[in-house]
Amino acid sequence: MLLWRARKDLGFDGPIPSAESTARHEWTDAERTRAMGRSKAIIAGTPDEVHTELTALAEAHSADEVMINTVTSDPDDRLTSYRLLAERLMG
């Protein structure tokens, strides 16, 4: 996700790269700098960890709702992520 976001910020609006292509990618200094800055805004982890961070973020901003966007090249991974988080939020 960080490679995709960094490249998008730098004007390359391509598809989300797979984990394999990201592992092979030779990062430019500009991509690394953008990714480091963007990484601070990412919430990731187990369903419990994500729930805790999202709850704290919502409370800090007095938000009634939170929009979640899971950025991954694999649709099955995206669905699994949403399912796990929904189970944690509803359960």
Image (cartoon, rainbow, N blue to C red):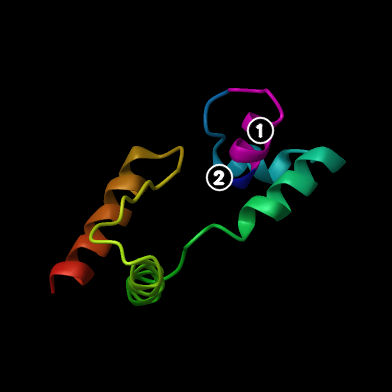
| Label placed on residue 9 | 1
Q: Nearer the viewer, residue 42 or 60?
A: 60
- Dot 2, crowdedness within 10 Å: few (<14), some or many (≥20)? some
Which secondary structure, mark 1? helix
As helix, strand or loop, the secondary structure at mark 2 comes to loop
**Residue 1, labelled with which disc?**
2
Residue 26, image x and y in percent? 80, 39
Q: Give the quadrant of the N terminus.
A: top right
Residue 53: image location, x then y, percent:
41, 72
Q: Which residues are magenta?
A: 3-13
Spot the residue most to the front.
Answer: 62
- First in sequence, mark 2 or 1: give its number: 2
**Residue appearing at x 63%, y 51% in the figure:** 38
Q: Position of residue 67 (x, y in %)?
A: 31, 50
Counting labels gives 2
Q: Is residue 11 magenta?
A: yes
Q: Is residue 4 left or right of residue 53?
A: right
Q: Amino acid at mark 2?
A: Met
Callout 1: 10 Å neighbours few (<14), some, many (20+)? some
Q: Please report the residue visible at 24 percent of the width from the left and 57 percent of the height from the top.
A: 65
Specify whether 22 is left or right of 60: right
Q: Amino acid at mark 1?
A: Asp
Q: Give the residue at x 40% y 40%.
A: 74
Instruction: Report the predominant secondary structure element of the magenta stretch.
Output: helix
Which quadrant of the view contains residue 5? Answer: top right
Q: Magenta stretch: residue 28 in it?
A: no
Say above or below: 72 vs 61.
Answer: above
Judge whether 56 appears above or below 58 on screen. Answer: below
**In whole angstroms, how far apart are the C-alphas of marks 2 and 1?**
12 Å
